[in-house]
Image (cartoon, rainbow, N blue to C red):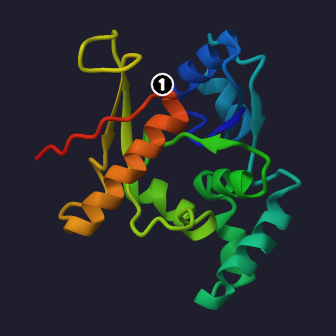
Amino acid sequence: MRIVLPEGTEARTLKAAEEIARRGLADVILLGNAQAVETAGKGLDLSAVTVIDPATDTRHRPYAEKFCELRKAKGMTMEQADALMHNEMYFGVMMVKMDEADGMVSGAIHSTGDTLRPALQIVKTAPGIPVVSSCFIMELPETDCTDAGVLIFGDCAVNPNPTAEELAAIAVSAANTAETLAGIEPRVAMLS
């Protein structure tokens, strides 16, 4: 899998990128100015990591054009789209949209809103998903209460006061995440 990390100069992100590449878990793409990434990652082995600068990459203009097209009904102009493609968060989501990355991991230095906004504007929700939600995945030693040592906590950050229907949709999404990402048979519990 090709995973884009848009927070390319953040220390924990850089350490994670080094570890992921070292273990061969994914092809890592860090976003940011190459010199700034190199400076921030001094002492780390990032030789197996791809660094892309959204401001100078050849995909910048085509991504801006595609984003403008996607958002034209909302009044997006080419100038606005061009400016937003300088933002690593938007560029990273566009990489996923254009199938040049399989996923994006963010949130080390960006708020939930700043992380979700580009995804909602570019990728949108899956068909049949009525409410956007998030989840945290915790890997623990295998116990009586976890399958394969994995717990999925559905929506700890997006919906502060969900309706009963939204709670049901969030539970279904969390269960789907458990099956898809962890390969486990989900057991759902509602916590308050």
Residue 10 falls left or right of residue 146: right
Disc 1: which residue: 12
| Residue 17 coordinates in the image, percent (x, y) | 61, 23
Q: Residue at x 62, y 63 (%)?
A: 123
Which image quadrant for residue 143? top left
Q: Is residue 80 above or below residue 149?
A: below
Q: Is residue 45 visible?
A: no
Q: Is residue 166 visible?
A: yes
Q: Secondary structure at mark 1?
A: helix
What residue type is disc 1 on? Answer: Arg
Q: Is residue 114 above or below residue 140?
A: below
For the N terminus, the quadrant is: top right
Which image quadrant for residue 66? bottom right
| Residue 4 coordinates in the image, percent (x, y) | 66, 39
Disc 1 crowd rating (10 Å Cα; few below 14, some 14-19, many 20+) is some
Q: Residue at x 55, y 19 (%)?
A: 15
Residue closest to the eye, 36 or 97: 97
Q: Residue at x 29, y 51 (%)?
A: 157
Residue 109 falls left or right of residue 52: left
